[in-house]
Amino acid sequence: MRILFVPLSGATHYYPQVVLAWAFRAAGHDVRVAAQPSLTGVVARSGMTAVEVGRGYDFAEHATDLPAVVQRHLGRLPSSIEEAREIAATLPPEVLRELDEAKYLPQAAAAEAMAADLLEFTRGWRPDLVVADHAALTGPLVAERAGAPLVRNLYGPWTGATVPYPGRGMPVGDWPDVVRRLFERCGVEVREDYTAATVDPCPETMQVPGIARRVPVRHVPYNDSGPLPGWLREPPARPRVCVTLGTLTEKSVAGSTETLIQRIIAALAGFDVEIVIAARSSAGGSVGTLPANARVVHDLPLHLLLPSCAAIIHHGGAGNVMTAAYHAVPQIGVTQVPDNTFESESMAATGAGVSLRADRADADALKAAAATVLLEEGTGAAAARLRTEILAQPAPARVARTLLELVRAPVREPA
């Protein structure tokens, strides 16, 4: 059968799809990945075949549009969904409309650019099944036009369970005009939900209730490819702590000019540990002067590093949370935006780590969190239980067979 994967343009949205794509391919199915230009190299490194689409608009270049609008009106970003809702209730209608436009316009523009190429591609290569990122508007467009079942692919604790989205639980009357017009131009009926199944990798204690037609799957980490460094072939001489913060690395916190990475390193000074700062070479910037027990590594896949680690400090992203959970590594999530806060707090609720908001991550809070994950046996035991839950989930190969049953069920006629 022909299986089409539709990620968003960011690599971290594609990585959670890779192992399921491998499972389909290993079972002998024809698999393609619809990728914008910024993602085609990432797809190729994963061993899958990319179909380049959406050349006229790169979503990745506009991913910061909404935060920029929020910053302009509020002077800061809300750090949780609850805080965002409280703030939204105080804003005038014209500001809410501007925020809605900033939220949905990049998604709709990327979907329109991708849809034009994808609809042309699928006229000759008609997919039997479409597996799409839960936030990709292109997924339902292509699935409906091809008459194929749509599978949503989650990558961790899902904030969308509490935030409706067009085509994913949002009442038709609430759809933003820009998204409604896109679906109408593509000849697709506007409906509240298009989901035939939702693949959810969350272990049971982290699952969000209310996921439509949930299909649990075992999370198997993939964080890009690369060689195993020689220093990782030997066990560390002392407990190793991974620090990976994305763009938070260069942020100052709690009214200080000190960057967050510097504050974390200072907080770890009282512990006999090795510090490995994992960064992307494309991120640029500097972490400043490092102590003798710290090093920076670039572009090292996290699934290669974490098996040797006693703890990880990250920005709360789902990929970090789930990879650490798979390897039973206690975690500290230092978060700045609502999605990451939700994901990090879901992890912390299991006892497998600590969640802090970046603006509250002062020296004392970070030292206390480090003591919790490095010294308290209960945290390690909870992390081990989380790994056991993950391993109890159905393997991707089994889930691939389950999803193929959707193809054999009655589906909608091509639009």
Image (tube, rainbow, N blue to C red):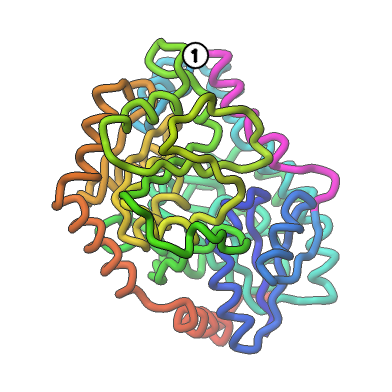
The answer to whether residue 317 is above or below residue 380 is: above
Q: Residues within 10 Å of mark 1 (few under 14, many from 20)?
A: few
The answer to whether residue 240 is above or below residue 402 is: above
Q: Quadrant of residue 63?
A: top right
Q: Quick one: quadrant of the C terminus?
A: bottom right
Camera-nearest residue between 13 and 382: 382
User: Which x, y percent locates residue 222?
Assistant: 53, 63
Element at badge 1? helix
Range shown magenta: 54-75
70 drawn magenta = yes
Camera-nearest residue between 318 and 92: 318
User: Left or right: 377 with respect to 111?
Assistant: left
User: Left or right: 170 with respect to 324?
Assistant: right
Kind of residue sitting beneath label 1? Leu
Question: Where is mark 1, residue-wise?
Answer: 74
Say which residue appears at 39% left-offset and 51% top-offset. Answer: 321
The answer to whether residue 13 is above or below residue 220 is: above
Say which residue appears at 21% left-offset and 31% top-offset. Answer: 368
User: Which x, y percent locates residue 19?
Assistant: 54, 71
User: Left or right: 99 with respect to 111?
Assistant: left
Tell me if residue 134 can be seen.
yes
Camera-nearest residue between 25 and 234: 234
Q: Quick one: quadrant of the N terminus?
A: bottom right
